[in-house]
Each structure stands twice: as structure tokens, then as C-alpha cells.
């Protein structure tokens, strides 16, 4: 952010009038009863919006409604005038792109700025004025997030000021909080929680509040291009120009069929070495070159099925021992450079945008970039870490990139839980690494809108994008100021999670946790191992800090924020207990968590449907649905072993060789695998897993057949009951055997069968003379992830 109270530095562009010496800063006291907001009769929408926002906030501070009048107001009345979109006559200097200016004199204030393109200059001048001069902050969406101090008069510092953003584009995407025409019905798994679904009116109010918060945070600007460029190419050119497309593993230039047919064409890869592709990209851009500076050459989504032709392979720089098609950056930079050279012939300032993403994430090893190539860096699966960021941005800068853009999925990967993780400084530090290496744009995906938990991360990141020059502590203090006299206590609360959890527990295990979650998903990996990281003592310590804060004398709005922080901390404790509980104890903790949520659903500004979705989408982690779905079974519900013996069967030999009839002692050479994870996402979770390196490598992308086996005791007093194996979910089809005999099957016929619980009756096959029963399951998976991925229970019903 560029602004100054040393007004004489700006006198060159402002000029000096006899009425006001702008090189001498003064303070003027403005009486709310004797002021007005002036709008030109032909005011633009942005200026009208600026007037409304100024009126709203001056009203909150003073308790009075400041009138909005036309510019024909009688200026002799002596009113102090806040003038919207009106430029002082002595300011003749041209405005920079997205620039805001505001001038404060003893008799009037002027708010104006750039009106071209994303012309919110006047509105942003109002927001920066409110922050700098009147101490207003917006720490979360809606009126509840407005931080201000009541005052009987406005004490304004005279002078001329400006704000020019360092980043040409600043955004944390709105996520799911977008105005809707209707509320989608909840999926069947959430039907019991319909009371948590907001009304359409409430949802849209919240969506509008989120959008307004983004505007107040100055999230806007000129996005420097960037998209998956070739998603429609097969439909457009598949028949006429098959040579544009990748030579696939079958020796054909056509899309490789994917399990999701709709994405087969969307994910098609092109042939980067083909000059015809360059010509077609330029031809498609030329009709819009007059108003579009950016030519899009971003790689399509997906990490496989790239061109295997000789010319493309020659462009790859493969390290010794590296698998082919692992690092493909050089071939796509080669394409971008060719497009960049050609585009400059048609428009001198043309720029070509590419994605550094998946197989093209890391910098080229041989190619150097043309100066007009923009690199959108998308660290999708790599950990949120300053060293990783330095390798990415620093490496691209060394390769010649002059314009870098940060386009991460960090919110999706790190902030979708409603547990405190202390990630805000790491988020800030990674952003600062990007800025130091030439980042001109930040486009984060996306706000998750669980504000009592995530507001600190989102606020600090948003303010850093507005002004990268300020240190982390500056924005942390500003955020905590919303808690008034409890600011130091609240800061201590956030410091605890950041220092004790993130720095001491999460950061040293960051790679491990992200690998555990698969696809770089920190939240999923963390939720699958909560008991390793959170302790009741953490919540004891943080509750004590917040209770100390509650003893302070606070204004009503400050007290409400603190009360919500206390509640969200209690909720996190109950959530950890439920997720980390043993199967035998889970139903009790799930009930306590659900009761708390029902009692406080209107007290916590959380997106409840999303909260349930994260838990259930990762295996009903808190046990909500297990308790509901198993209510018809007699207690106790007995969990089977978490780890089952496991054997791959890629050649489908198991049926012919009768593996289901194998005795337990004859499967001692089988490996061990968890049954609460897809087989692709096992990794080295714990010491009980005994996967060989060869098996682990195969499982990373395995579609086919595999077998599971375990032993299970059945209580003698269950004899005479109906007894079942209750599977949380198996992806996709399975055949279940007890003591070598087929007990039942669950076949993949409908699209949701891979995630649907089911039961297999086994009591007719139980050998009551044996201490344990042998359970064998043959699983067949034909696409995507696979295996027994939700726990298996032994349950019973009355005969």
C-alpha cells in the first residue's frame, strides 16, 4: 500500500492553493450534525455505493444519519462536505490503474480514483479513509464483523493521500457463498440434519455479506489471464485436426477414455511440439486482441495421458531414475514461448499465460521463458511451506519469469475443518515469498466461510494482499483489536494454536499429514489422525485464556465475538473427542457433539452443511451416521480389527485357487492394510501396516481385484440372534465369505453404491465350536479409488 501523511511529497500532483497549505498537516473536528455526503447528479454506481458505505459507517460511529445530498447543496450553510467522485480542481495528475485518492481539507473531503476497468477507486478511497482515519476494520462479513469506536465527532487528519495496489489482482474466491435462486435439497446422508440448512433468505443475506467483505478488503483487479486452455479443443478440432492432440499410449491421437465420460474430452492433452497448435492458439485470439492482452495457453487438468510423440519427448528433461511424464514443464514452456513470440507480432504488449500445475508445477530445467509469459503457479498437492514456495517462485524467476501469479488451493486443503490449526502465519509467510519473487497476482481458492475459525487467516491474508509491506504482527494486532480490552488475551489464544500445534506438531509432520490425506489434503490427513495431535490439555489451556478474556470489561459487540470464540473452542474439543474416540465409545461422543451443535447452531457463524459434509465425506469421522444407521442393532456393536490381511490379485487367480478357503495360518505372508482408508491412500500410516514398497507403489493407482481377511470372535450369548457384518462402505463390488463359504455380496450397480453402508448376514455360517470366525472379502474396483474404506462392524438383531 502506498500512502502518506507527509502531504508535501504529493504537492507536485496536487498543487497548492491559497486556501489550504497542504504541506502542513492539521486535524479538523467534524460535527456529525453539521456535515453531509455529496453525490454528483450524474454519479456512477460505484460513487453511489461509496456514499452509502460512508453513510453507514459514519452513522455507526456517531449514532446519527449523515444526509446524502446532490452537489447543488448550499455550501454557504457551513456544513462539512464529504464529496464522492468529485476531483479537486487543482489535481490534474493522471490516475494510475486502480488508484484511489482522498483529500482532507478543513472544509471538505474528496474521495475519487480510477474509473477504468475495475474502477472502484472512489469506493476504495472511502474504505482506506475509514481504516486509517477512523479506525474501522472488517474482521468478518456482515455487521457483526465491523469493528469501530463510537465518537461524538470525527477527528480528521488533513492532507492528500493515495492507495495504489502492489498486486494487480487480489482475491480469495467466495466459495459456496453465492446468491442462489433456491436451496438444493440435502443429500440422503444429511437428511437427519435438515434443521442446520439455512433458509434461502438467510443464505443469500450471508452470501451478500461475504461479497461485501471481499469488496471492503479491496479484492478486485485485473486478472492476468489463466485457465485450462484446451478443454473444448477435441470437440472443435478432433475431426479436422487430430494432429493437434497427444499421441496416447494406444498410439492414437485422441482422448483416453476416463471413468467419468464427461471429463474424457475436457481432460484431453495436446501436442505441445506441433507448430499447428501455436497457429491455432493465435488464430483463436486474434479477433479479441484489441481488448484482450492475454493469450491463454494453460495446460488442461489431469496428470496423465500426455503426448508420447518423439518430438515432445525430446523436449522433456528427465533426471536419472525419474519416471517418464513426471516433469513436463519444458515441453509446455516451449509451446508458450512460441505463442509469446507470435503474439508480440500482433500486439506489442501481448502476454501468454500458462499454468505451473501438477506435472508442470516446477520450473523448466532447460527452457528459458520469453519475457511476456505469465506463469500462474498452482501448488495443488505440494505442502503449504515457505521452502516449497521459494523453490517454486524462485525457480521460475531464475528461469526468466517476469510475471508470476499465485493461484493455490490452500483454503480447500488447509481450512475446511472447523478445528483451530494455527496456519495463519504460514499462509502469510508463503504469500510473502511469492511477493519477493515477483508475484503480481494472488487468486486463492476459496473462502470456506467458517468465520469463527478461519477469519484470522482470511483477514491477515487479505490485508497482506492490500499492503505486503506490513509484518504479520501488524495485521494480527489489528485483527485482535476487534476484541477491545481482551485483545491481548485473544492474541495469546491464537498464539497458542500457532506455536503449540502448528509449529511444534503439524509443521514437523506436514508432509506426512498431507500424504496421509492424499492429493496434498492436510485437513483430511489431520482428521484421519486427530488423536496423534490434539489433546484435552490443549483445550484446557485455551479455555483458560478465553475465560481470562471474558473477565475484561467489553463492549457488546466485543463480548459477542468473545462468546463465539469460547463456543467454537468447546465445539472443537467435542469434535476431537468424537472423531478420535474408539469405536466402542464413538456413539456417546457423537451424541454429545450433535446435542451441542443443535443447541448452538444459531450462535456460531459456521456453514453447518459444509461441516457435516467434511466429516461424512471422509468416512463419517464423528460417528454421526454410524450411530443413526446402527440404532436398529442390539448393543454392543463390536468393531472388527482395523487392520486386515491383504493380498493383491491382479490376475484374478483367487477364485480359481479358492483363497476364501485358506486357513488363517496359511495367509501369514499376506500384508496388513487398514480398512478405514481406500487402498490407494494407505501410505505408511502406522507400524501395523506392513505394506512392501512394491505393493505400496502398485496401490497408488490400482484398479482391479484384491482380497481381505480377518478373524473375529462372536459372543456366545449372541447365539440365536440374527448376526451381521455391517460394512461402512466398499468401493466398488465385493463378495463376503465366512469360514470359506459365501455369505453374501454387494455389487456396484448404482452410482452411490461405492459409498453406501450395507449388511451381510452371517449367523447361519458361524462355527460356534471355534474361538474365532474367519472373514474373507474379495473386492473388485474398476476405476478411481477402491477397497474397504469405512470400518466393518459385527452387529446383531433379535431373532
Image (cartoon, grey):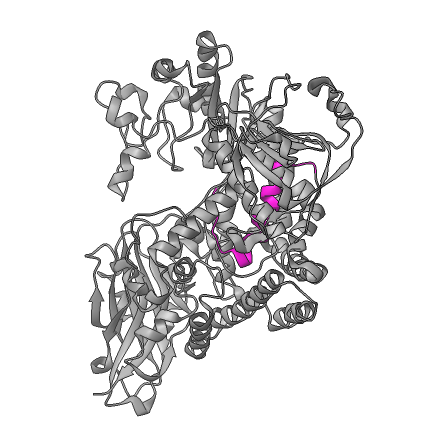
In this rendering, the answer to whether 576 lies above or below 479 is below
In this rendering, the answer to whether 144 lies above or below 344 is below
Q: Nearer the viewer, residue 301 or 32?
A: 32
Q: Quadrant of the N terminus?
A: top right
Magenta span contains residue 437: no
In the image as oriented, which residue stretches furthest toward the bottom? 717
Q: Nearer the viewer, residue 464 or 633?
A: 464
Q: Quadrant of the C terminus?
A: bottom left
Image quarter of residue 285 = top left
Magenta span contains residue 462: yes
In the image as oriented, which residue stretches furthest toward the top? 345
In this rendering, the answer to whether 243 lies above or below 475 is above
Where is residue 147 drawn, in percent x and y?
Answer: 61, 52
Residue 798 seen: yes
**Residue at figure coordinates x 31%, y 54% from the top left:** 183
Where is residue 736 drawn, in percent x and y?
Answer: 25, 69
Where is residue 433 drawn, in percent x and y?
Answer: 64, 37
Where is residue 296 drawn, in percent x and y?
Answer: 42, 23
From the viewer's perspective, tell me whether residue 385 is left or right of residue 413.
Answer: right
**Residue at figure coordinates x 24%, y 78% from the top left:** 762
Q: How many marks?
A: 0
Over which residues does the magenta segment extend? 445-469
**Residue at figure coordinates x 32%, y 26% from the top left:** 247
Residue 253 seen: no
From the viewer's perspective, tell me whether residue 652 is left or right of residue 117.
Answer: left
In this rendering, the answer to whether 551 lies above or below 23 is below
Main SS class of the magenta portion in the image: helix
From the viewer's perspective, tell me whether residue 644 is left or right of residue 557.
Answer: left
**Residue at figure coordinates x 54%, y 26% from the top left:** 364
From the viewer's perspective, tell me whether residue 332 is left or right of residue 460.
Answer: left
In the image as oriented, which residue stretches furthest toward the right? 24
Q: Nearer the viewer, residue 485 or 246?
A: 485
Amino acid at each position: 500500500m502506498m500512502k502518506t501523511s507527509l502531504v508535501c511529497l504529493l504537492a507536485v500532483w496536487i498543487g497548492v492553493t491559497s486556501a489550504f497549505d497542504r504541506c502542513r498537516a492539521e486535524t479538523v473536528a467534524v460535527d456529525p450534525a453539521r456535515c453531509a455526503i455529496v453525490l454528483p447528479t450524474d454519479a456512477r454506481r460505484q460513487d453511489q455505493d461509496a456514499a452509502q458505505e460512508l453513510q453507514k459507517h459514519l452513522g455507526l460511529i456517531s449514532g446519527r444519519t449523515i444526509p446524502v445530498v446532490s452537489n447543488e447543496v448550499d455550501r454557504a450553510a457551513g456544513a462539512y462536505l464529504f464529496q464522492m467522485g468529485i476531483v479537486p480542481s487543482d489535481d490534474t495528475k493522471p490516475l494510475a490503474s486502480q488508484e484511489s485518492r482522498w483529500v482532507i481539507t478543513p472544509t471538505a473531503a474528496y474521495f475519487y480514483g480510477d474509473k477504468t476497468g475495475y474502477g472502484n477507486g472512489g469506493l476504495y478511497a472511502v474504505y482506506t479513509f475509514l481504516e486509517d482515519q477512523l479506525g474501522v476494520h472488517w474482521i468478518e462479513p456482515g455487521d457483526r464483523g465491523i469493528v469501530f469506536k463510537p465518537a461524538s465527532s470525527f477527528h480528521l487528519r488533513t492532507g492528500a493521500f493515495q492507495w495504489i495496489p502492489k498486486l494487480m489482482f487480489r482475491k480469495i474466491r467466495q466459495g459456496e457463498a453465492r446468491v442462489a435462486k433456491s436451496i438444493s435439497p440435502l443429500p440422503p446422508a444429511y437428511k437427519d440434519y435438515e434443521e442446520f440448512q439455512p433458509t434461502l433468505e438467510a443464505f443469500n443475506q450471508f452470501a451478500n455479506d461475504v461479497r461485501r467483505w471481499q469488496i471492503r478488503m479491496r479484492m478486485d483487479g485485473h486478472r492476468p489471464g489463466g485457465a485450462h486452455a484446451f478443454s473444448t479443443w477435441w470437440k472443435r478440432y478432433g475431426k479436422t485436426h487430430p494432429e493437434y492432440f497427444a499421441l496416447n499410449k494406444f498410439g492414437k491421437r485422441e482422448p483416453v477414455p476416463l471413468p467419468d465420460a464427461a471429463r474424457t474430452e475436457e481432460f484431453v492433452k495436446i501436442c505441445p511440439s506441433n507448430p499447428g497448435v501455436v497457429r491455432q492458439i493465435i488464430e483463436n485470439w486474434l479477433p479479441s486482441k484489441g481488448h484482450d492482452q492475454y493469450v491463454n495457453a494453460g495446460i488442461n487438468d489431469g496428470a496423465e495421458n500426455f503426448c508420447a510423440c518423439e518430438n515432445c519427448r525430446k523436449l522433456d528433461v528427465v533426471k536419472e531414475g525419474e519416471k517418464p511424464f513426471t516433469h513436463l514443464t519444458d515441453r509446455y514452456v516451449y509451446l508458450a514461448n512460441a505463442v509469446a513470440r507470435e503474439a508480440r507480432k500482433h500486439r506489442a504488449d501481448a502476454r501468454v499465460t500458462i499454468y505451473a500445475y501438477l506435472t508442470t508445477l516446477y520450473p523448466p530445467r532447460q527452457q528459458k521463458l520469453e519475457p511476456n509469459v505469465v506463469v500462474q503457479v498452482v501448488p495443488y498437492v505440494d505442502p503449504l511451506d515457505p521452502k516449497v514456495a521459494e523453490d517454486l517462485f524462485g525457480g521460475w524467476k531464475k528461469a526468466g519469469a517476469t510475471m508470476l501469479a499465485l493461484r493455490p488451493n490452500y483454503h480447500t486443503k488447509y481450512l475446511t475443518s472447523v478445528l483451530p490449526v494455527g496456519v495463519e502465519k504460514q499462509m502469510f509467510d508463503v504469500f510473502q515469498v511469492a511477493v519477493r519473487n515477483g508475484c503480481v497476482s494472488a487468486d486463492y481458492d476459496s473462502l470456506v466461510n467458517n468465520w469463527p475459525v478461519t477469519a484470522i487467516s482470511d483477514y491477515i491474508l487479505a490485508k497482506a494482499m492490500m499492503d505486503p509491506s506490513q509484518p504479520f504482527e501488524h495485521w494480527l494486532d489489528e485483527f485482535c483489536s476487534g476484541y477491545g480490552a481482551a485483545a491481548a488475551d485473544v492474541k495469546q489464544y491464537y498464539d497458542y494454536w500457532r506455536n503449540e500445534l502448528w509449529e511444534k506438531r503439524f509443521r514437523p509432520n506436514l508432509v506426512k499429514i498431507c500424504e496421509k490425506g492424499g492429493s496434498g489434503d492436510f485437513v483430511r490427513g489431520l482428521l484421519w489422525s486427530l488423536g496423534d495431535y490434539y489433546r484435552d490439555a490443549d483445550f484446557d489451556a485455551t479455555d483458560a485464556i478465553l475465560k481470562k478474556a471474558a473477565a475484561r470489561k467489553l463492549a457488546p459487540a466485543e463480548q459477542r465475538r468473545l462468546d463465539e470464540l469460547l463456543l467454537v473452542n468447546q465445539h472443537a474439543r467435542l469434535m476431537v473427542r468424537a472423531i478420535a474416540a474408539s469405536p466402542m465409545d464413538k456413539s456417546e461422543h457423537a451424541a454429545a457433539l450433535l446435542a451441542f451443535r443443535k443447541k448452538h447452531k444459531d450462535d456460531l457463524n459456521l456453514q453447518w452443511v459444509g461441516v457435516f459434509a467434511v466429516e461424512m465425506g471422509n468416512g463419517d469421522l464423528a460417528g454421526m451416521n454410524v450411530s443413526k444407521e446402527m440404532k436398529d442393532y442390539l448393543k454392543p456393536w463390536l468393531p472388527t480389527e482395523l487392520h486386515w490381511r491383504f493380498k493383491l490379485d491382479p490376475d484374478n487367480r483367487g477364485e480359481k485357487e479358492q483363497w476364501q478357503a485358506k486357513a488363517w495360518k496359511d495367509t501369514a505372508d499376506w500384508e496388513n492394510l487398514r480398512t478405514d482408508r481406500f487402498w490407494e491412500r494407505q501410505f505408511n500410516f502406522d507400524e501395523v501396516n506392513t505394506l512392501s514398497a512394491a505393493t505400496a507403489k502398485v496401490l497408488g493407482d490400482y484398479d482391479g481385484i484384491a482380497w481381505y481377511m480377518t478373524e473375529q470372535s462372536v459372543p456366545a450369548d449372541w447365539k440365536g440372534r440374527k448376526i451381521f457384518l455391517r460394512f461402512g462402505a466398499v468401493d466398488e463390488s465385493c463378495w463376503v465369505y465366512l469360514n470359506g463359504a459365501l455369505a453374501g455380496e454387494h455389487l456396484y450397480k448404482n452410482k452411490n453404491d461405492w459409498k453406501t453402508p450395507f449388511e451381510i448376514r452371517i449367523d447361519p455360517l458361524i462355527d460356534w465350536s471355534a474361538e474365532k470366525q474367519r472373514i474373507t472379502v474379495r473386492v473388485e474396483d474398476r476405476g478411481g479409488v477402491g477397497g474397504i474404506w469405512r470400518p466393518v462392524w459385527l452387529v446383531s438383531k433379535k431373532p
